[in-house]
Amino acid sequence: MTVFEFIVGVAYLVAAMLFVIGLHRMRTPSTARSGNLVSAGGMVVTVVVTFIYAVATSHGSVWGWAALAVGLAAGAVFGVVRARTTKMTDVPQLVSLFNAVGGGAAAAVALADFVHSTPGALVSLDSSIPIVLDVLIGGVTLSGSLVAAGKLQGIISGKPLQFPGGRIVNVIVVLIALLAAVLVVVEPRNVTMLVILLVAALAVGVLMVLPIGGADAPVVVSLLNAFTGLAVAFAGFAIDNQAMIIAGALVGAAGTILTLQMAQAMNRSVVSIILGGFGTADSVAPAVDGPGASAANVRQVTADDVGLQLAYAQHVMVVPGYGLAAAQAQHEVADLAKILTDHGIDVKYAIHPVAGRMPGHMNVLLAEANVPYTQMLQLDEANAAFETCDVALVIGANDVTNPAARRPGNAVSGMPILDVDHAKSVVVIKRSMSPGYAGIPNELFSDPKTGMLFADAKKGITDIEVAVKQYVTAGS
């Protein structure tokens, strides 16, 4: 080993340490932002060192290096611009797009290494197996993530899309992919089989994500993120790059753990989610001015009623759901909370793990509106706080607050929920009485202590804020 190679190895080790430290800091909202920067610093070190090493040890043409430099610059500019111009409500789509790019890039690395290997030379198992796994997982990630992004963006219907005999087709395509993978390992020079493997993997990704409903979006995004990490790790094995192996393994492990946690939060297995999930009844419900025919036992309230309750409460818990994100009402909620806090009222936010369209979506959304991290309570601590809560303000959340989950025999049975009904009083801001993703009525809405304010989240919060100001002023 030369001195130069030793320095490169040390640099990769430093980058790996930064990845681990950054990932550790992403565990909590208060340190997640700095953790992201630390991990980004590790990636900068990796890219710069790899580029220098490639220039110093290869004999590529000037045009080749120029193309590589242009590609790096274009990717950096696109990433910065796209991230800065993306709305917080569209972050899940952006994450899915990044997953697609990561999986596709990893598969491209394996394909390039396979095609440009020494003609006539025997490809060993320690090279062919990582290449095959990289193409398989990378292909599934690329197509599956693009379909997921399309569902989240509304380009593709968010409802589970299934067709007669679909699962049989899935099994056939998976078997074709596995057979092609085995043949590539047995005959490492069989380019045709490698192409068949890639096409089959792309088909598997599409067929896997299409039947998945909108309620399962957080699990799907997390699962595809884990796939991206695995694809990158296998690409690292294929080209013998330590940084890619370490980074990919970390992303794969973290994504897998997060996927299992998301599935547990929905009381469902990952396998059942992949085989087809809940629909998206709530996401397509039309806005209405009243409760509708299914609201016979519902108590309807006005913004003035809610403003009066909040102004004279001591402890208020805000329960955000995807309805808040869709209405982009996070700033209005933060303004209302500030008015209450300035009036001496304790305000907290109860965050369910699958309240948004991806893990941590609600935390990011509220952080954009400068909501203090200390006010965001996760499931267990939020449920403990509901026991002393005067008013629980539910904004666009449905299945994650349904008391029916405590009973067997329905679509949400066993799902960990926010114990909103344990608060002294509950206010639900919702456009209509339509069911959530699970397709069943929410028993919270007909609870005698619950008042329903039928309105768009942004308009409803704005009207409540006006009412609160009046009562606060009158009482001061």
Image: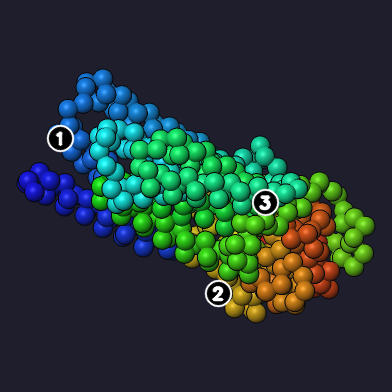
Q: Position of residue 84 (x, y in %)?
A: 47, 38
Give 334 or 10, whichever is nearer the viewer: 10
Separation of residues labelled 3 and 1 (CA atoms): 50 Å
Q: Earlier in the sequence, mark 3 or mark 1?
A: 1
Q: Amino acid at mark 2?
A: Glu
Q: Secondary structure at mark 3?
A: helix
Q: Is residue 201 above or below residue 17?
A: above
Q: Do we see residue 219 in this rendering?
A: yes
Q: Amino acid at mark 3?
A: Ile
Q: Secondary structure at mark 1?
A: helix
Q: Which residue is mark 3?
A: 168
Question: Nearer the observer, disc 2 or disc 1?
Answer: 1
Q: Earlier in the sequence, mark 2 or mark 1?
A: 1
Count neighbours of disc 1 (C-alpha within 10 A) and say few if under 14, some if 14 to 19, many if 20 or more: few
Give 320 or 475, whichever is nearer the viewer: 320
Label disc, if present, on residue 381 of the rendered structure: 2
Q: Which residue is mark 1?
A: 57
Q: Position of residue 455 (x, y in %)?
A: 78, 51
Q: Is the C-beta separation of discs 3 and 1 under 8 Å?
A: no
Side of 122 where 186 appears, left or right: right
Give 320 or 192, whichever is nearer the viewer: 192
Side of 184 where 206 appears, left or right: right
Question: Nearer the observer, disc 3 or disc 1?
Answer: 3
Q: Is residue 114 above or below residue 181?
A: above
Side of 17 where 431 appears, left or right: right
Quarter placement of the C terminus: bottom right
Tell me which residue sits at (29%, 51%) in the image: 126
Separation of residues labelled 2 and 1 (CA atoms): 55 Å
Q: Position of residue 399 (x, y in %)?
A: 71, 63
